[in-house]
Amino acid sequence: MRIGLVGVGRIGAFHAATLKGLPSVDQVVVTDADVSRAELVAKDLGVEFAPSVAALLASGIDGFVIAAATSAHAELIAAGVAAGIPTFCEKPLATDLADSQRVVELVEASDVPVHIGFQRRFDAGYQAAAAQVRSGELGFIHHIRANTNDAFPPPAEYIPTSGGFFRDCTVHDFDIIRYVTGREVVSVFATGANRGESFFGQYGDVDAAAGLLTLDDNTFVSVSGTRYNAAGHDVRMEILGSLGSIAIGLDEHTALRSVESGVAFPGGQAHATFMDRFRPSYVAELTAFTEVVSGQREVPCTVRDALQAFRIADACELSRRENRVVALEEIGR
Ligand SMILES: NC(=O)c1ccc[n+]([C@@H]2O[C@H](COP(=O)([O-])OP(=O)(O)OC[C@H]3O[C@@H](n4cnc5c(N)ncnc54)[C@H](O)[C@@H]3O)[C@@H](O)[C@H]2O)c1
């Protein structure tokens, strides 16, 4: 199969390399608004280059992968759907709710499969946790703690097209909370701060945030994250139930050290980036997309799922700005 990819920045170049290594993919062709970057990545990886999105879509591709900046997602998904080509798009759907809703309407009115990239759904730990929560073996879940801590911030130019901390970063936690529990968020209270470089504040964004979510079965979920966690890229979740408690992402590579004497755990090297932490998940995710392309499976993470995660992010942003509890019902469907 022939896969076209647009956007060869941090994640796009990584996805292009992953796609090239998949047994089901024969050819990869890449493009980018920055044509010279696309040419360079194509040369480095030994894949094809297309001079524009239009040329890429017209080049006989079977699947279209969007890894461009978030501000370009809505338009590029629309282009993939108009061309009738199964499309994978990185999270989130768009930078704002209105565009996200328009994407959902467009995709649901078509028969073109569109898969959104929340790779944690393909992580073995989150999958095992979902199975245990849903089997009831943990009893009722009273608390969940989720965190996404980046080791270092993205470049300043990434921030204005990112959608902001909750929509860009914590949105992964919001999606995986729904996936693991099968429950919906009913209300949020969130806050944030800019204690690192000032460019976050200049764009109205924060570099650290925390929120308390209440699920529709009265489970309390605390979510936190930062762009400044030099100890390592630290993505974990703890699920505390009436009959048992489990942790996802707690292993020898966890970016924590104990101050208790005689405790050597965790002893390994911490993950530096999301690529280190989720490498097998990205491979599984893009393999799943190729199965969507060949008609072997349904879309595993839909635009409707992405809209739900986005609504939670929007509620957190509103809560942070207005310093109050926000009901999800306030955020349009
Ligand atoms: N799932 C994950 O773990 C994960 C991790 C990182 C980034 N992402 C998402 O991937 C996307 C890209 O993030 P990144 O960190 O690679 O950003 P980046 O800034 O490194 O790269 C973005 C690339 O998109 C290109 N681009 C922008 N607008 C374009 C357009 N209209 N047409 C063609 N190319 C265009 C830019 O020139 C750049 O090369 C974002 O939406 C981000 O949310 C997801």
Image (tube, helix red, strand yellow):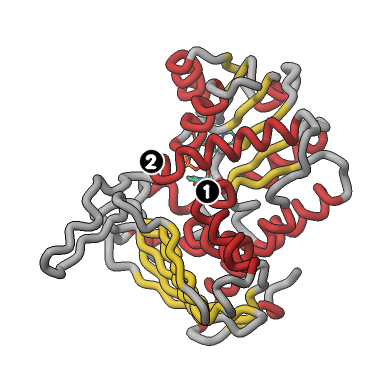
Task: Give the camera-side residue of 308 and 220.
Answer: 220
Can see residue 188? Answer: no
Q: Is residue 117 left or right of residue 305?
A: left
Vertical arrangement, residue 153 with respect to residue 309, above or below: above
Q: Which residue is depicted at the point 63% across and 75% down?
A: 185
The location of residue 307, given as percent across then percent down, is: 69, 60
Helix, strand, or loop for circle 1? loop
Q: Which residue is depicted at the point 42% across and 73% down?
A: 210
Numbered label tally: 2
Q: Which residue is depicted at the point 87% across and 44% down?
A: 110
Q: CA distance from mark 1 to mark 2?
A: 13 Å
Task: Give the camera-side residue of 289 and 6.
Answer: 289
Location of residue 72 (image quadrant):
top right
Of the numbered discs 1 and 2, the one sitting upstream in the chain is 1
Locate the N terminus by quadrant: top right
Vertical arrangement, residue 110 with respect to residue 96, above or below: above
Q: Is residue 209 left or right of residue 296?
A: left
Task: Give the camera-side residue of 171 and 214.
Answer: 214
Of badges 1 and 2, nearer the viewer stands 1
Helix, strand, or loop for circle 2? helix
Q: Which residue is depicted at the point 72% across and 33% down?
A: 291
Residue indicated by mark 2: 276
Task: Give the camera-side residue of 177 and 187.
Answer: 177
Locate the C terminus by quadrant: bottom right
The location of residue 179, given as percent across then percent down, is: 63, 61
Type of amino acid under label 2: Asp
Can see residue 50? Answer: yes
- The crowding category of the residue bearing disc 1, from other C-alpha atoms within 10 Å (few below 14, some 14 to 19, many at least 20), is some
| Dots 1, 2 in contact, CB < 8 A | no
Q: Is residue 72 left or right of residue 295?
A: left
The location of residue 250, given as percent across then percent down, is: 36, 58
Residue indicated by mark 1: 123
